[in-house]
Amino acid sequence: SHWVMPEQRKTACESLLLEAGCNEKVVAHCRVVRDVALEYARCNPLVSAELVEKGAMLHDIGRGMSHTIQHAQLGADLLRFLGYREAIARIVECHTGAGLTADECTLLRLSPRDCMPQSTEEKIVTHADNLIEGKKRVNMEETLIAATFLPRRIRKRMYRLSQDVELLCPS
C-alpha cells in the first residue's frame, strides 16, 4: 500500500540509520530532533511535515561514516546514492550550525557546495538540531553560549535562523 503509518516510517528511517553505521545514541538524538522539528512544521500549513520528519530523522546519517563536520555532506551523498529525494538530501547537507557557504566548505576541506539552508523545511531541521544537545532540549541562548568558539558571523547566522523559524509559529 502507498500510505505508511508513522510508526512504520519511523522504523524505516531508524533501520536506515543503523544500517549506515549510526549508533543508538545518534538514533535517539535524531528522534528528539524530529519531535522538535515537527512542532515547528505543524504550526505552519505551508510546511511539509513529511519532509521535515524524514529530513530530521536522517539528518545525522553521515555520522555512521564520520563524526566531523563532514558528516553532513557524506550523509547527503549517501541519501542521493540511495535514491532519496533531493529535498531530503538538502536538509541533511545544510543542517550544520546554520549552514555553510561554498567558500566556508572549501576552507573546511569539504566539497565546495552551497550548504546554506534555504527552504523552510531545511531551516526548521537545522534550528531544531541547534536546540538539542544529545537528547536534552536547550534554548537558543544556551546554544549560542556553547558556540562562543565559532566566529561571530556564524553565531549571528544561527541567531537569525532561529528568529526565522520561531516566526513560523504564532505564539
Image (tube, grey):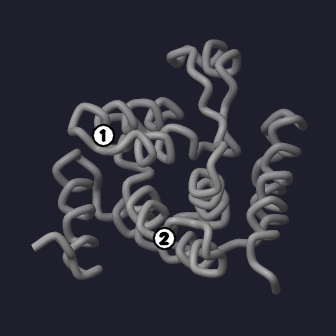
Camera-near label (1 vs 2) is 2
- Relative horizontal placement of residue 147, taking residue 42 as reference (left or right): right
What residue is rendered at 25% in x and 71% in y?
Answer: 9
Question: Which amino acid lies under the numbered mark 2 shown in the image of this protein?
Answer: Ala
Image location (x, y in percent) of residue 100: 67, 31
Q: Quadrant of residue 104?
A: top right
Relative depth, front residue between 68 and 33: 33
What residue is rendered at 66% in x and 36% in y?
Answer: 116
Which label number is shown at residue 49? 2
Secondary element at image label 1 = helix
| Label 2 CA crowd tier, 10 Å (few <14, some 14–19, many 20+) | some
Relative depth, front residue between 117 and 74: 117
User: Can you say whether 93 is above or below 108 in the image?
Assistant: below
Image location (x, y in percent) of residue 3: 21, 75
Q: Quadrant of the N terminus?
A: bottom left
Kindly identify which residue carries mark 1. 79
Question: Which amino acid lies under the numbered mark 1 shown in the image of this protein?
Answer: Leu
